[in-house]
Image: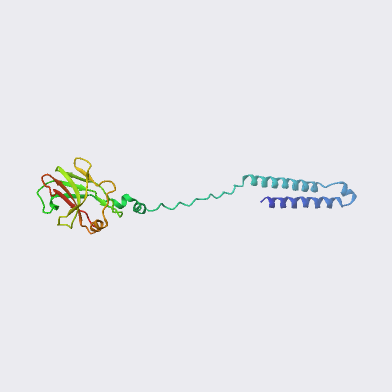
Amino acid sequence: MACSCNIAIEQLVRCAHVRIRAVAMTTGERRMKTSTKDVRLICAASAAALLLLSGCASQSETAPAKATPTAINPTPPPAAASAAASAASPAAVTAAAALTLSAAQEVPPNPSSATGKSTIAVGPDMVVTGTVQVMGMTPTMAHIHEAAPGNNGAVILPFARTGENTFAPAPGARLTAGQYASYLQGKLYINVHSAAYPGGEVRVQLPGK
C-alpha cells in the first residue's frame, strides 16, 4: 500500500512541474505573470499529495498485525496399558482369588460348620505366597497336601501360624519341580487340622493352571 501511495504522489508532483515549465516558456509578459489558474493547479496538486500521504500514513498505523501462528504441541502418546505393566509385576503373577475352605470338601466330609478363606498362590518361580484364615474352629495346623480331588495325600509344605486363626507359608517357601507340576494339574490342596478333626476339618483344592 505504501508503494502505491508514493507512486501517486510522484505523478501529481510531476504534473505540477510540467505545468510550471510550460508557464515559464511562454512569452515575456506571460513568463512574468503566473496565471491564477496555474497557481490553483499547483496548490491543488500539493494539497492532494498531502492528503494522499496522510491517508497512507493512517492506513499504515491502523493496519492489523499479522497473527503469529502458535505451535501446537502434539498430545503425548498414552502410557503403556496397565495390563502390560501388571503382567511384569511379581505381585500380579502370584495373585490369586480367594478360595473357600469347607468341611464338605474333606475326604470323607465331616459335619463341621467351620469355614475358611485362602489366598494361597504359586508363582512361575514356584514360590508360594498368600494366607489362610479359618472361622468357627480352633485350628492346630495347616498344610499343602499333594493329591487329586477326592483323595488324601501327604503333606508337602507346612504353614506357619501367624495369628489365632491364620496361617501363611514361610517367606521364600518354594515347591519342587515335581510338586509344581502337580500344582499345574490341580493336584494340590490346603488342609486345616484341629483337635476335633485331626485328619483335617476344612479343605480346598488349589485350581490348576
Q: Position of residue 155 (x, y in %)?
A: 19, 52
Q: Residue at x 89, y 48 (%)?
A: 29
In the image, 33: left or right of 141?
A: right
Q: Position of residue 209 (x, y in %)?
A: 25, 58
Outermost residue toward the right in this view:
28
Outermost residue toward the top in this view:
164
In the image, 68: left or right of 15?
A: left
Between 183 and 62, the one nearer to me in the picture: 183
Q: Position of residue 148 (x, y in %)?
A: 18, 58
Q: How is the image coloured?
A: rainbow
Between 36 and 126, the one nearer to me in the picture: 126
Q: Residue at x 67, y 47 (%)?
A: 56
- Total of numbered circles in the picture? 0
Q: Position of residue 151 (x, y in %)?
A: 15, 57
Between 208 and 192, the one nearer to me in the picture: 192
* Res 29 seen here: yes
In the image, 31: left or right of 175?
A: right
Within the image, what quadrant is residue 176 found in?
Answer: bottom left
In the image, 124: left or right of 3?
A: left
Between 169 and 105, the one nearer to me in the picture: 169
Q: Residue at x 72, y 45 (%)?
A: 50
* Res 209 seen here: no
